[in-house]
Amino acid sequence: MAAGAAQSVPMEPVTLDADGLRLVAWEQRHLADLARIYADPLIERYLVMPLPWGGPARDRFVSLQVRHWQGGNPRWAVEEEGVLVGSMALTKSFPSELTITYVTAPWARGRGVAQRAIRAAVAFGFERLGAKRIAWDAIVGNHASRLAALRTGFTVEGVARSGVSQRGTSRDCWVGGILPGELRGPGDPPEHYAALKRQAAFFMGDRPELDTGAAGLRLRGLREGDLDDLAASCADPQTQRWVPLPRPYTRADADDWFAVCRSRWERGRSVLYVLADDADRYCGSIELTLDETGEAELGYFASPWARGRGWTTAAARRLCRLGFDELGLERIVWRAVVGNEASRRVAEKTGFTVEGVRRRMRHGADGRVDSWVGSLFPEDLA
C-alpha cells in the first residue's frame, strides 16, 4: 500500500544543470521567445503541432506543463545565461520507456544546445524515473535532430513509414532509442561523426547549383519538367545496355524515380544532380550514393544529345569535389559493367584508379555480370 501511495504522489518540477545550460520549469516569461521559436520556418517544417501557435494553446501552455510534471512527464525550458534557447521533454510511452522530444531556438543553433540538454534529460530519465529505454523519433529530413541523437548515443533503428501525422499530412519518421549505459559524453563522438555532421548541414540546407567549369554546363536538382527528357535518356539503347533500368523505360518510370530521388535526398542517402545546358535542358544525371562509413559510390549517364562534349567528366569532377569538401567523404567508389569503355574513360579522367574486376555483380535485368571497380581519394581528384 505504501509503495502504491508513493507512486500516486504528483511529481514536482526538477531543475537540471547541463554544461552551461539550465533546464527549468516553464514560466510566463518564456512565452514570447517560445512564440519566436515556433514561428521559425525550419521549426515549422518538422514540428507536428498545430501552427501558427497562439490563442488558447498559448494561454494554457504553462498550466499544461504543470499538469505534465504532475503526471510524471517532465517538461523543461532550456536556458543559457537566463535566455531561452530550447525546450526538452520526456513522456511516458510504455512501461519503463520514455520518449524524448527537443527543440533548439534558431538563435542558439550550432552551440551544442540539444546535445547538452539531451544528456541531462536522458540521465534524469534513467536515474530518477527508472526508464529502461528512451525512444526518439523525428520526421525524415530533420537531420539536425538525428545528428544530436546520434551524437549523444541513440541508435537510429529505422524508418516508420507514415509514422506521424503533421497537420493532416502523413510523414515518414526516423525512429530510434537509447538504453542505460549508452549515453555518449562530450569527448566520445560516434565513429565518422565529422562526416555525419557535415552531411547533416548539407542536407538541411537548400541544394546548391554547381558550376562545373565546362562551357554551357551546370549541375542542378531534378525537376518535374525534366521527366520527359529523363525518360527518353533512360530508354536510349546505349543507356539501357549499361545502366540497370526498367525495360522498357516509360514516363511512369521517370515519375517513380522522381519520387525516389526526393525520398533519398530527405534521408541523406543520395546526392543527385542533373546536367543542364545553357537552355536549362536535362542532359543527364550524376549521383553520389552515401553510406555511413565516410564512403560513397558515383554513378552517371549522359543523354544521347549531350554525349561527346566532355560534360560527364566535368560533372564527375565537380560532384566528387563536393563529396570530399562538403560531405566529408574519405573515399568514393565507381563501378561499371566490363566493356563500358565510355564510363571507364570518364572515371579515369576524373582520377579514379581501376582496381580490378568483381565477378558476377547484380545488374538489373541482365542478372549477374562482371564489373570493373575503382576508387578515388581526395588527392587523386584530377
Image (tube, rainbow, N blue to C red):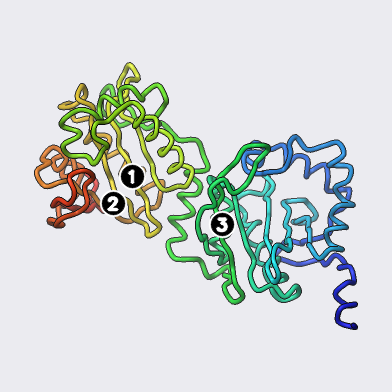
Q: Earlier in the sequence, mark 3 or mark 2?
A: 3
Q: Nearer the viewer, mark 3 or mark 2?
A: 3
C-alpha gap between disc 1 and disc 3: 25 Å
Residue type, label 2: Ile
Is the residue marked by circle 3 packed among few (<14), some (14-19), or many (20+) residues within 10 Å?
Answer: many
77, 54: nearer the viewer: 54
Which of the 4 image quadrants contains residue 236? Answer: top left
Helix, strand or loop under label 2: strand
Residue at (19, 52) in percent of width and height? 374
Tell me the quadrant of the picture where the C terminus can be found. Answer: top left
Helix, strand or loop under label 3: strand
Residue at (35, 49) in percent of width and height? 324
C-alpha gap between disc 1 and disc 2: 8 Å
> In the rendering, at what x and y percent does residue 222 appear?
39, 30
Left or right of 50 on screen, residue 116: left
Residue bearing mark 2: 332
Above or below residue 246? Residue 132 is below
C-alpha gap between disc 3 and disc 2: 28 Å
Which of the 4 image quadrants contains residue 119? Answer: bottom right
Residue bearing mark 1: 288
Above or below residue 3? Residue 293 is above
> In the rendering, at what x and y percent does residue 190 appear?
48, 66
Residue type, label 3: Val
Above or below residue 247? Residue 339 is below
Helix, strand or loop under label 1: strand
* CB atoms of marks 1 and 2 within 8 Å: yes
Residue bearing mark 3: 175
220, 155: nearer the viewer: 155
Tell me the quadrant of the picture where the N terminus can be found. Answer: bottom right
Residue at (84, 42) in percent of width and height? 58
